[in-house]
Image: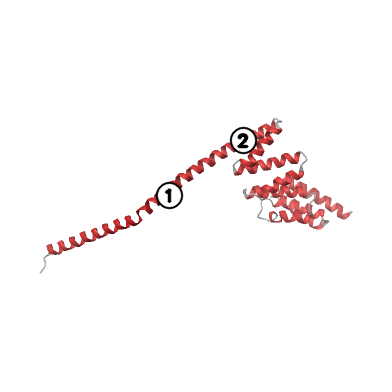
Amino acid sequence: MTTKNDDASANLLIQEVDDELRHEQMQQLWRKYGNLAVGAAVALVLSVAGWQGWSTWQTKQRVQSGAAFAAAIQALEQGKRDEALAALGSLAADGSAGYRVLADMKLADIKLNAGDRDGAIALYDRVAASGADEVYRDLAVLKAAYLKLDGAEPAVVEKMVEKLAVESSPWRHSAREVLALAATKRGDEAKAAELFRKIADDPAAPQGVRARAAELLAASGAKAKG
């Protein structure tokens, strides 16, 4: 007959054997997979360090590009056009992502003011096809569409901006103006009047766009009566 002490001793022995087995299993697992664990830990450390380095580099690039863009605008305001164009061209090629877009848009404006409509359209088209934020791409589409009204087929221009004319689009008023002008160009005065009226009656439309739409609506009505 066993005593309580014997039972306790047996339980202790079993506990020690279990602990030893677990220890042995852990050693075997470490021998088998230890290198992988170390490698994973090293990879994690390197990835974190790499990400921090990349973020720091990106921040530095943005700061440098911002300073270069500001200097280019200042040079332009001071009448140093060639210097400004060179700086903007460099930014458009090698600046940080956001400033590449801003440089292209500014260069397009400069070309347009200088009478180079095709050059401006090419730059707007480049921004529209880039990986820039949607707001910049849509703005570039609108600017290009306005310029293409003089030369391109109305259907081409309409296709460019039709998705921007929906109610949910922040650009709907300008897009509808382009659609109305394209309709006028192809002789659809009724469609043009409908779009101009929609803009003129929309209190959310910018005041300048509403006023222009009202004037064009009046002109189209007068033309229809004549």
State the residue at coordinates (51%, 43%). Answer: 55
Residue 43 - label = 1
**Above or below: residue 111 compared with residue 183:** above
Identify the image quadrant of the N terminus.
bottom left
Q: Quadrant of residue 58?
A: top right
Relative image position of residue 214 (x, y in whole percent): 78, 49
Report the amino acid beneath label 2: Ala
Relative image position of residue 103 (x, y in whole percent): 66, 40
Pick the front one: 150 or 185: 150
What is the spatial separation of the Cα atoms under label 2 and label 1, in whole angstroms? 37 Å
State the residue at coordinates (76%, 45%). Answer: 118
Residue 68 - label = 2
Relative image position of residue 149 (x, y in whole percent): 78, 50
Task: Indicate the secondary structure of the residue bearing disc 2.
Answer: helix
Pick the front one: 27 or 14: 27
Task: Indicate the secondary structure of the residue bearing disc 1.
Answer: helix
Residue 193 in view (yes/no): no
Report the amino acid beneath label 1: Ala
Q: Residue furthest bottom?
A: 1
Q: In this image, 107 relative to 217: left or right?
A: left
State the residue at coordinates (68%, 34%). Answer: 84
Label 2 Cα neighbours within 10 Å, binned few <14 / some 14-19 / many ≥20:
some
Relative image position of residue 12 (x, y in whole percent): 18, 60
Residue 197 - label = none
